[in-house]
Image: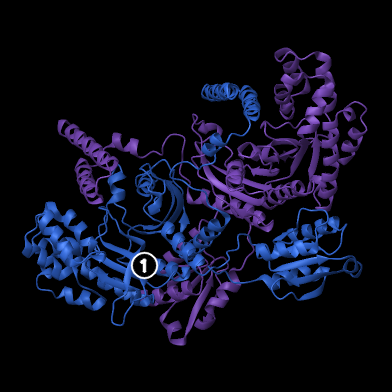
Chain colours: A blue, B purple
Amino acid sequence: MAERAALEELVRLQGERVRGLKQQKASTEQIEEEVAKLLKLKAQLGPDESKQKFVLKTPKGTRDYSPRQMAVREKVFDVIIRCFKRHGAEVIDTPVFELKVPFARYLAMNKLTNIKRYHIAKVYRRDNPAMTRGRYREFYQCDFDIAGQFDPMIPDAECLKIMCEILSSLQIGDFLVKVNDRRILDGMFAICGVPDSKFRTICSSVDKLDKVSWEEVKNEMVGEKGLAPEVADHIGDYVQQHGGVSLVEQLLQDPKLSQSKQALEGLGDLKLLFEYLTLFGIADKISFDLSLARGLDYYTGVIYEAVLLQTPTGAGEEPLGVGSVAAGGRYDGLVGMFDPKGRRVPCVGLSIGVERIFSIVEQRLEALEEKVRTTETQVLVASAQKKLLEERLKLVSELWDAGIKAELLYKKNPKLLNQLQYCEEAGIPLVAIIGEQELKEGVIKLRSVASREEVDVRREDLVEEIRRRTSQPLCIC
Amino acid sequence: MAERAALEELVRLQGERVRGLKQQKASTEQIEEEVAKLLKLKAQLGPDESKQKFVLKTPKGTRDYSPRQMAVREKVFDVIIRCFKRHGAEVIDTPVFELKVPFARYLAMNKLTNIKRYHIAKVYRRDNPAMTRGRYREFYQCDFDIAGQFDPMIPDAECLKIMCEILSSLQIGDFLVKVNDRRILDGMFAICGVPDSKFRTICSSVDKLDKVSWEEVKNEMVGEKGLAPEVADHIGDYVQQHGGVSLVEQLLQDPKLSQSKQALEGLGDLKLLFEYLTLFGIADKISFDLSLARGLDYYTGVIYEAVLLQTPTGAGEEPLGVGSVAAGGRYDGLVGMFDPKGRRVPCVGLSIGVERIFSIVEQRLEALEEKVRTTETQVLVASAQKKLLEERLKLVSELWDAGIKAELLYKKNPKLLNQLQYCEEAGIPLVAIIGEQELKEGVIKLRSVASREEVDVRREDLVEEIRRRTSQPLCIC
């Protein structure tokens, strides 16, 4: 024990030495020498259960992603990125160290007045992780924005179209996009008699209406936030309404609300938006919802949030939202704050809640007990007899060079049964079996793993045949 | 000025307040309220050149990536990932906070004895950035590894095949892969009479032979590192040799070197490796180079490094390496260090020097003055007359729904010339032009931007025609 402790101390000291040299920017050579010593000491120290338990952990608030999880992530990102590209978006990347509105800073710094871009990146938060609630310190963010001075509501409508395309393609269930406008909210608060200083906090209360009843929201407004009960009731008359373009039109005629210039502007824009959404074939997915408030203070116009719907449990019940999976809105003032000359660059954008979507897809796959392939291998190059390693290497190389995704077992003389079993486990659909007879005849036996059917294919036709049999459309599940 | 200073102080204090609330995990609502105040104060403060210069910078040692740079990165990654997938690799992801050998920790922690995986991620270094030398604090790493107990040299050969496939596909010029074996180096040092304690430092000197002359290396060994001159000369006889499998065979017969069991093992494996590389059709790209040492101490067997070659300036000159773009080797001991039971998981892997490759591709594109497309848009939906916004929206939506990458200008009544100009600038190859006459006839005018040819296409055939005209093979340049 004493010896072990001494060795541990040596390892610790040597570790410090290495770190010190690195900080002093010592020569690579010198550092390498000390690292070598460190590794030797560690090897002498050998494994130690208590130590190992410490090492064999990911840092607090983080986790590994297994091949299965990564396969899910890849498929989700594939759907999202294909959609962004379909809409002509560019990609930019900004440093991860910068936590505040990097896109606005990027536009101002590069004097850009015009861009349609997406950005998918891992980001980090400093606060205490609550991993049980799915809050990790390391997580993905996925944003799409259109910046520029354009004719009203065309880019806004495209953002909603993009959200609908992505959520439909992901096949994670029925969804609804709630839409509102910051100006309608502000106008409504004003005509209801909410004092300016209470706009934000009342906004937050209203935003809870998707989770709790109006009574509870009212109690909070009146009890906690000191709003007059009649003002709260007045707000309640508005924020409990939701519907389509007809509600927009009805509110445009509302004798009180139409007194607010702001509200009228917002309603006018929403009316136009609904026209465009109808042309885009997605108006039935959109609900004008006066209770949608969204937290972030920088929104200046239309705001939206997509929620997944749970199937109603009884007849006549309304579908219940199970949480936001995408959201966004218009923020016309943000870039100007960063620009030395205060140049205004109107922006509209959206964020996809990818971490939430990952969980949903994973849960669904688990519930369905579906096997997720973690590779895309089309064919395993196998042999029926011994001493065919060289032939397997030659064939697999031919297939790689032709762009076919192919594997072989790294054994000199694998049993055919083991090779077939490997395909079953890895979900590889085809096996190209080399045998002595086949070599003489210039053919390869191509076997379908699912049907167990085998056919001889001329070697020169093999690539084409594999392509033909494995050209399947991409599918999320 | 005094007022400004007071406002600045207020902004500072309010900022502190917000940070404090966040640390105390105050309610979202409360934080939002304070953030709103902060933003209002900032708005009052308005733009200030000196302040703005501070804000309009990326953090030290980091940079933005423009759409052009991202397009290059995407193409490079696409080549690399397609190759990894072609070889049946899975993906795993490990937390970025963990800087030391996460793959080995992952295997040990999950008790995996068997995986072929790649990992591409942004990583971070803490040391002082030297951006002029291309050293950023934020950069990409790209690794591929095969872990498991397999028959000798099959996975090793596949790693070399992968390096060759990637470097060929990237079309960044001719290259060579230097190969050596840690055991040959160790055996050679032993029989030359290098003391055990000097193996590492002499190894580092040898590794410089690709940059400086043998004389300089010898001077370092003898002068700085205290090696006997005759020992250095003996080493020199070996390490100045390079060649193909015939050099391996020659050294297997070398009366001195063959006394080392270690060296014999290494040479035997290299001989087998060359057999496999010949079957893979890449033996001509590989050079057995006794001076290749590689720094990292955890390699236990074959090591390799790919270098780009400069075209020789004169006849008879040997091609000159311009630096490593990929490297790797076998490390059979690392995972065992992490495993509580010391279980051994042999590994072989490679890293692609993607940051270096990005620079090379960017430089080459600049030298060729090549335009890099930053979007993949296939067609712009345009109109020849005014008042056709609704028709444009309807058509672009049809195209999106059919999976076509399409854009439109966000203007109600854009001029045709402006729409065509946009295509020229963005490199969009096709324009689908809607006109009143065409609407009546049920056709769309499809224009090729390059040739300026226009043909009428029936609306129901448009998707197929766009697909047919834009189905081009992927190309790096």
**Residue A85 place in picture, x, y as percent:** 49, 62
- Specify whether B4 is left or right of B239: left
**Residue B378 place in picture, x, y as percent:** 53, 67
- Give the labeled residue for mark 1: A160
* Residue A343 appears anywhere in the view: no
- Specify whether B330 is left or right of A258: right
Q: Residue at x 81, y 37 (%)?
A: B288
Q: Residues within 10 Å of mark 1 (few under 14, many from 20)?
A: many
**Residue B65 place in picture, x, y as percent:** 48, 46
Front residue of this view, candidates B127 and A310? A310
Q: Residue at x 80, y 66 (%)?
A: A433
The secondary element bearing badge 1 is classed as: helix
Task: Inspect the image, locate mark 1, and give the three-letter code of the amino acid beneath it.
Answer: Leu
Q: Using the image, determine if residue B384 lies above or below residue B16.
A: below
**Residue A470 place in picture, x, y as percent:** 67, 70
Q: Could you tell me which chain the residue with mark 1 belongs to?
A: A
Q: Using the image, determine if residue A179 lies above or below residue B102.
A: below
- Specify whether A111 is left or right of A453: left
Q: Residue B473 lies in what quarter of the image?
A: bottom right
Q: Residue B325 lies in what quarter of the image?
A: top right
Q: Using the image, determine if residue A346 lies above or below residue B390.
A: above
* Residue A383 appears anywhere in the view: yes
